[in-house]
Image (tube, rainbow, N blue to C red):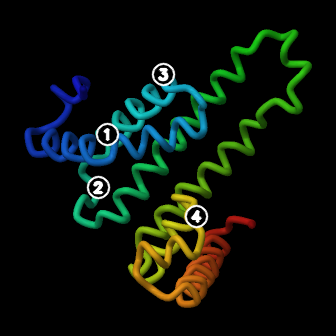
Amino acid sequence: MLLFTAEALNENDKQRLTLMYEKYSRRMYTAAKRILNSGEDAEDAVQNAFVSVAKRMGSINIYDEDALCGYLIAVVKNEATDVLRKRKNTVPEDELADTPDSFDTVFETEKREVFEYAVKIMTQMDDIYRAPLYLNVVMGYSPKETADVLKRAPATVRVQISRAKQMLAEKLKEAGYEL
């Protein structure tokens, strides 16, 4: 499973990482497979995501499950995007003519920075806003499905999602990111 951690982490961090893997790897695999359409590439993305997570074990709050799950899904989506980017860069030249545009790496890097900062902002939000926003934006649930999961009224959830998006947009603008 996570052999790369053997020398790099202390026992406590190894246990925490193993628990995270056991609890979230299936969700991460599903998110990566949606992006990559390949089980093998999705497995690679999950493994790479856990390598990244292992490097940041000291700064990860494992006690806030919503934030942790959101963080892990964000990391695996970034890794899946990297796999796509690498795959795109290895496409033979004659096939490149059929693709619309090549990746603009500067744009992709900026987009990734904005995404990572947005995830950081989301983890700092009050749970009243974070949970509906996470389920709606990250997990792709409709407002009605989100309301069912959270056992809240659909109208309440729509308002909470809207307010959370406004807060997120304001924080991103304050940080200098253009939307």
Disc 4 to disc 1, how far (Cα)? 26 Å
Label 1 residue SS: helix
Residue, disc 4:
137
Which of the 4 image quarters holds residue 49? top left
With 59 as the anchor, is 104 left or right in this view? right
Residue, disc 3:
40
Residue 52 place in picture, x, y as percent: 38, 38
Residue 116 place in picture, x, y as percent: 53, 55
- Residue 134, placed above or below residue 33: below
Disc 2 to disc 3, how far (Cα)? 29 Å
Q: Nearer the viewer, mark 4 or mark 1?
A: 4
- Residue 64, placed above or below residue 110: below
Is tag 3's residue or tag 4's residue first in the polypeptide sequence? Answer: 3
Label 4 residue SS: helix
With 95 as the anchor, is 81 left or right in this view? left
Q: Amino acid at mark 3?
A: Glu
- Residue 161, placed above or below residue 78: below
Residue found at x 31% / y 39%? 55
Q: Nearer the viewer, residue 90 or 73?
A: 73
